Structures are given as C-alpha cells and as structure tokens.
Image: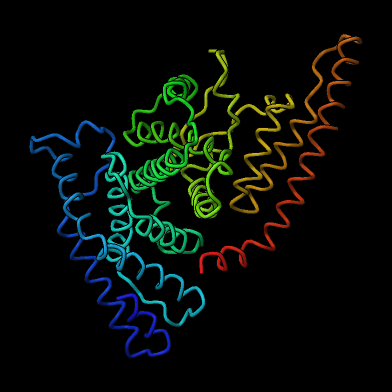
Amino acid sequence: MPDCLVLGINIPSLWRPSTSALIKKINDLCFSLPTQRLITNENNLNDDESTPDSIYIKSLLLCSSKQPYLIALIDSISIYFDTIHDHIDLTCQFSSGDIRDLLRFIIFVSEIIYLNIIKKKSFLSWNLIESFFRCLTKTIQNSTSIIYQLLNATDQIVSCCSLSKTILSIFEYLYQRHGVILLNKQIKKQFLQSYLNLIEPDNRPFTQLLILSFNDLDRLYYLTKQIKSIPNFYRYYLRTIAILLFRLPIFNSFIRIPTQFWEQQHHDINKLQFGTNDYCLSSFPVDLLQHSDIMADYIERISFVGWLSRTQFQEIWVTFLAAINPPNQNNDENDQITNSLTKEEILETNASQWYILLQGSRARAKMKSVSVMKNLE
C-alpha cells in the first residue's frame, strides 16, 4: 500500500485507486472493531466478563497481532498527508465518514500501543511507535488538516484524551528503559484534587475526562524538561509530539497555566471555568504573574508551546502588560514607594524574559517549516 501511493504521486491513474483502497481497508478495519472507548482502568485488561470495556480491549489486542499490517496502513496515511501538503491537486474529497474513520484508526493504533506498554511487554517495536508519531505529526501539524479540524470538535474529546494518555505512556516507557528516575505518581496525584478545587464544577461528562487528562498533561510537561536524559535518537519525535499535543485547543488553555496556580490553597480565589462551547479553561488571575518565579514558569510554557493565532498572541501580550503594570490601590505613601520598587523589579526581570521569548519565537517561526519537514524525512 505505501509503495503504491509513492508511485501514484507521479502517476494519476494509480494515485486515485491507491487512496480509495486505503480508505476501504481502514473502513473495513474500523467496522470490525467495537465503538471507540477510553481505557481508563488498567484492571479491565484481565477482566474475563463480557463488558463493553473488556470486549473493546480484547478486540484491540487481537488487532495488535497484525502489527506489520497496521504499520503499512499508518505509513500510508502519513504519505497521503505529506503528499497533499506539496501537491494540492492530489487532495481527495473524502466523505465525513471516511475522515472519521481515519481519525478512529489513528486512535485505535494509539490504544494498541498503550495496551502493549501497560501489559509490560518485554519488547515493544519502535517501528510502530515511530510510524504512529510520524502519522500524528503529518495529520495534526497543519491547522488546516482535516484530521486536525475534526480532532478539535467537542465530540472528539475522548480521542484527545486517548492521545494524551498514550503519549504519556510512551514517554514513561522510554524514560524507564534508559534509567531515568521518574517523579512519583503519587506526588502528582495531589494536583488532581487541586483541579477539582480550583475549577468550577461542571456536570458534563467530558469535563471529568478532561480533568483526568490534565493530570497526564502536567506529568508529560514535566517529562519534557528531562528530555536530555534519554538518547538523542528519541528526542526529536518526543519533543515534537508533546508540542503538537499541547497545541491542541482543548489542551492549550490548561498547559499555559503556571504550576503555582494549582498549588494555591486559598478557597476564596476566583475559580476557572470550562467554556460553554469549546471546553477551554478561562484565564487565571493575572496578578499571579507579579511574582517573578510564576512569570518565569508562564514564559517558559509560552516559549515551549508558542501561540495558536494572532489573537492569542495579543491576549498573551496584554496579560504580560497587565502583570508588569498592576493598579496601585494603596494610598499610603510608604506602601506606594514599596509597590513602585516592586514594580520596577518585576519590569526589569520579566521584560527581559519576554524579550528573549519574542526573539526565540521569531527564530522558531523561520526555522519551523523547514526543520520539521526535513527531520521527518
């Protein structure tokens, strides 16, 4: 299948049949599997009862035995999206059902990888992980991609949560294989309660899934800081995939919030809220950024993830200006002097950090389109 698509790039009569055959094979595979589910309980792996979860897991395990076939299909998807990026005329008009099956197949592969990792297989083929990463990069790197746009729909939150869970498991698997000491999971679970305390209760089922995923995202962000602890061979893929995951709009509002916000114990603070239509979190209190350590964390996150649009950049810039120019509400002369000195310290420290951020962002903007595609080849 991949070879046929490569040949079809210069042979139109072969390209169309190859893409049609790819879609049919994926449709048939997705039709043979149960409805997509989110594997959240490892205890279900050895469940002998015929529950929807156990049936789904058993079907995926059966499918995972056909690894070469899966790799061929997912490599074909990568080739297709890579080709239409440079040859717009070869873009096929897939139906909405076909696009959903393409995404479902990608999620199925991610769940298969996750199952193999948590079942503690002695050896997990890097070929499957590499193909999965390559496919994911090709399909969601471009915001105009049909997969990216579908993944951002509110009915695909389960898919986003599945990706975050699988990518985190791959990080932990590779780090452990190379002797990296990981942060205790029990320590990170304390943030789960913080999310519940500092986010307004929302009875919609997707919000509960997102809160669980926030714990995965926080741990994943922590692991990206230790990426130099593993061989250089893996670093590019891991870093790229982490950034793409953090740039998904459903996760982006969370990953930009400094860690110190979740460490607060104040119950009178204004809680964050999920958006009514997009499930994104509302903005955290700007006055927190008047502390240089919190501002440093905020800038580090923005520098790592970047911004999704011109509007978001403007919002970040306004947030920064509001943080370094807080309103002076104290009429006491001595307090005014103290506040003035604090403001100058904040301005000196944070403005320089922001300047570095802007310079780095301009450099990344010039290199991003060339370096990403070159390394993937």
Residue 43 pos. (x, y %): 21, 31
Which of these two is toward me, 155 or 173? 173
> Which percent across, then down, holds residue 134?
44, 61
| Closer-to-camera residue (247/203) | 247
Q: Which quadrant does the N terminus fall into?
A: bottom left
Residue at 46% in and 71% down: 82
How many labels sit on residues? 0
Residue at left 43%, top 20%? 193
Q: Which of 210 and 66 is in front in this view?
A: 66
Q: Eyeballing the image, is 134 above or below 312?
A: below
Residue 203: percent from the left, percent from the top? 34, 28
Q: Establish if 331 lies above or below 317.
A: above
- Determine which quarter of the picture holds residue 192: top left
Q: Is residue 200 visible?
A: no
> Residue 367: in sight, yes or no?
yes
Q: Identify which residue is drawn at 11% across, 37% down.
A: 51
Identified at 63% across, 47% down, the residue is: 312
